[in-house]
Amino acid sequence: MINTILVPVAIAIVSLLIGGYGGYSIRKNKWEKQASNAAKDAEHILKDANDQAEAIKLKIAKEKDAIADLKKKAVDTKKEKILEAQEEIHHYRERVEDELNQRRQELSRQENRLLQREDAIDHKDDLLDKREAQITQKENHVKQQQEEVAQKNQEADELIAQREQKLFEVAKLEPEAAKKIVLDNLSDKLVSERAALIKESNEKAQAKADHFARQVIVEAIQSSAADTVAEKTVSVVNLPSDDMKGRIIGREGRNIRSFEALTGVDVIIDDTPDVVVLSGFDPIRREIAKRALERLIKDGRIHPARIEELVDRARKEVNDDIYEAGEGALMELGIHKMHPELVKILGRLKYRTSYGQNVLSHSIEVGKLTGVMAAELGLDEKIAVRAGLLHDIGKAIDHEIEGSHVEIGVELARKYHEPDIVINAIAAHHDDVPKLSFIAELVVAADTISSARPGARSESLENYIRRLEQLETIAKSHQGVMQAYAIQAGREIRVMVEPNKISDDRTVILARDIKNQIEDDMEYPGNIKVTVIREKRAVAIAK
């Protein structure tokens, strides 16, 4: 029975053991499978984690590169901004310095003008003192002459009274009738005597001076030859086509505004084909503008920076040409010593005109004529040539400094230590002051010859007609004049008189009166010849 009980128990135990082991094996296999799946899942998770980590690393690396690039760009941008700021500061500093220099130059010019005005005022005071002394001397002389005239009038009155008394006694005439006879006789006699004196003095003066003066002037003119250069108040620049006008104007007019601001001239662009006109008061500025514009047209690159570059280059070239022109004038006339600044001012006359005549050519011609005439007369030829060359030096800067060209020329000659004879010749060549030397007289004569010769100067038709009308009006205003005609381009006036009202003797006096009125009322270059013609015809018809 024990065995019966033990066997089942043993079987049960074995079953339990086998069942337990089987369950354990099953659970173990299940656990191992779960562990394997968990390991696989872990590997996948770890792999995904590593992939994500690598992606994050790459993203972080890219972000770092992007941040580095941004930092680099920021540094570069900062450097560019700093450079631009430094450049802008540099340009601003240059503009400020240019403005300061311009203001300093303007102040210097104003100081020079004030000094020149002070010198001019002092000079005018000296002239006024001299003129007062001359006027006082003339007044004393006039008083003396008046006393002599009064004494002669008294003697004449006594003689007339004696003659009237004799006429009363001899002719037994009424006092009024006798007085009329005496006055008529006296008037006719005075007219005849006055005409005779004028003729005699003119004949004597002409007999002594005509031959010698004509010889000296002719020889001077023949020995000197100067080119006639006629300039205009505007400069014309030819264009290759009308399309160039638009490029010169530029977008919204920036090119033409820049050009006008840099050169100081007006650019006139109108409907005239293939032409641009440059207009300005200063001929040197016009020349600079003309050269710069011609080069811009040839170059084709027209913009403000290029305009500024070519204008500066043209200005330098014109300044060099001005100095070379001054030196050329000195070499042509054989003058060796002159202040460099005065040489530069002299060269500016190359671009200055007067009545269409180039002033530098005119000055050289006057210098030659003055030198030749001085040599003929035995005077200092070198001083004469120098005075003739510099007589119009004030015209070089008369548009920059206030005052006449004579006053400016005198101040320049004094400033650069020219001889006193030269200074007086400059001051007296328009009869503003007395001539203190014969060389000053020769400068006036040479100036008249150079400006009055045919073709030397041009004038407008309106001024020309006005001068002819004024000549004829002056002649016709005199009593007894029948007709007056201005001929020879206004250099001669012929006056026809009524023979019944004007005698032969009165024609001489009339010519002199017309001549004096022309000198007082008119301004003209050269000389004007006055010819009075009296013609009386007697007609009889035989039947």
Image (cartoon, rainbow, N blue to C red):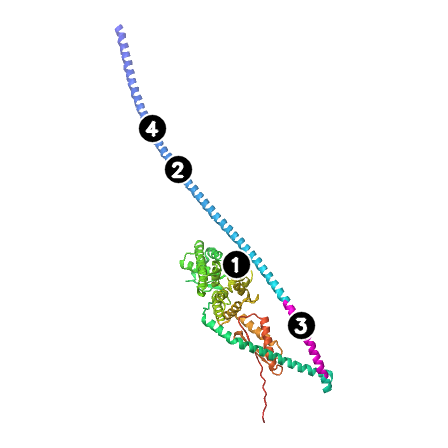
- Residue type indicated by callout 3: Gln
Whether the magenta-drawn stretch holds residue 101 is answered as no
- The residue indicated by pointer 2 is 68
- The residue indicated by pointer 1 is 415
In-image side of 540 versus 74 (left or right): right
- The residue indicated by pointer 3 is 146
For numbered disc 2, what is the local secondary structure?
helix
C-alpha span from label 4 to label 3: 143 Å
For numbered disc 4, what is the local secondary structure?
helix
Q: Earlier in the sequence, mark 2 or mark 1?
A: 2
Can the viewer see residue 285 in this picture? no
**In front: mark 2 or mark 4?**
2
- Residue type indicated by callout 2: Ala
Q: Are marks 2 and 1 in contact (CB under 8 Å)?
A: no
Q: Earlier in the sequence, mark 4 or mark 3?
A: 4
Total number of numbered discs in the rendering: 4
- The residue indicated by pointer 4 is 46
Can the viewer see residue 18 in this picture? yes
- Residue type indicated by callout 1: Lys
